[in-house]
Image: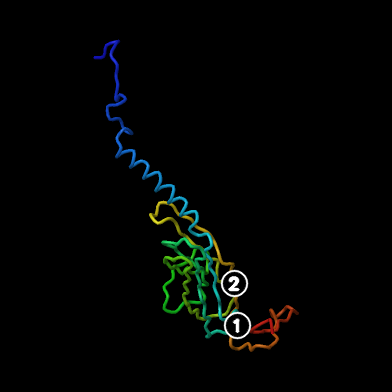
Amino acid sequence: MREHGDDLRVGRRGDGGLFEEPALRLEAAFQVGTGGIARLWARLSLEQVVYRRALSEHRVFVGESVEARLILENRKALPVPWLELRETLPRGMPTRRVRTAPGAVPGSQVLERATGLGRRDRLEWPVTLDAVRRGYYRVGPARLRSGDLFGFFEREQETGRPVDGIVVSRNVDVGQTVAASLQAPTLFLIARDLTQ
C-alpha cells in the first residue's frame, strides 16, 4: 500500500536510463540513419529508369507473329538493387516460351520480370506474340516497382504508353477494300503499314 509521501520513480538521471547508454544511442542513430537512407533510395529508385517496348509489326495476319523487345534502362549513377516489371499483353496473342498470368483487365495477360540494374545499365528481353485470331489488341501499359536496398520502402509507377495493333484474317488481302458491315456503306482499305 502506498503512502502519501512515497515517490514512484522509474528511472533517475545518471542511473543508466534508456538513452544514457552509448550502445543504445549508437543503435538509435544507426536505425534513424538507415531509415533515412532507405527512404531516400526508394524515392530515387525509379528516377531516370526508362522502360520502352519495340514491336516488329502493328498489323499482322492470323498465323503470323510479332517480335517484341522489352527494354529497361537505368540512366543514373545510383544502382537499382531490385526492380519488377509487369507488362500488360493481349490474351488473344499468346506468348512463346514465356509464362504469363491473367491480367486484371478482361482480355489481358501480364508478363512479370524481376531484375536489378547497375549504374547506367540496360537490359532487353525478347518476347514473341502469336496472332492466333483476328481482332484489335493493345500492348501496355506497364508497371514498374522498386525500392531501397533493404526492402523497407517501395515505389511504383505506370510507364510505357499502350501500343495498339490489329490482326486480320488471311482471307482479307493487304490492299483489298472491305465493307465494315453488310449494311454500312463505309469501306476500309486494309493496309499493313499506313505510313506507306
Q: Nearer the viewer, residue 4 or 98?
A: 4
Task: Tell me if mark 2 has few (under 14), some (14-19) or many (20+) residues whose alpha carbon lies within 10 angstroms of its own.
Answer: some
Dot 1 or dot 2, earlier in sequence: 2
Q: Residue at x 43, y 52 (%)?
A: 153
Q: Quadrant of residue 23?
A: top left
Compute the Cα span from label 1 to label 2.
Answer: 17 Å
Q: Residue furthest left?
A: 1
Residue at x-position 33% and y-position 41%: 26
Residue 168 badge: 1
**Is the image coloured rainbow, by chain, by secondary structure, or in one colour?**
rainbow
Three-letter amino acid code of the residue under disc 2: Val
| Above/below status of 71 relative to 80 | below
Task: Say above or below: 20 vs 5.
Answer: below
Front-lying residue, 135 or 41: 41
> Which x, y percent locates residue 179?
70, 82
Rendered residue at 46%/67% (across/down): 102
Quadrant hosting residue 14: top left
Residue 172 higher or lower than 35, as above or below? below
Q: Residue drawn 58% across and 83% down?
A: 60
Residue 46: percent from left, percent from top: 50, 60
Looking at this view, name the residue that lies furthest to the top. Answer: 4
Labels 1 & 2 near each other (Cβ < 8 A): no
State which quarter of the image contains the N terminus.
Answer: top left
The residue beneath circle 2 is 163
| Amino acid type, residue under disc 1 in the picture | Val
Find numbered disc 1 in the image and state the secondary structure of the residue it sits on. Answer: strand
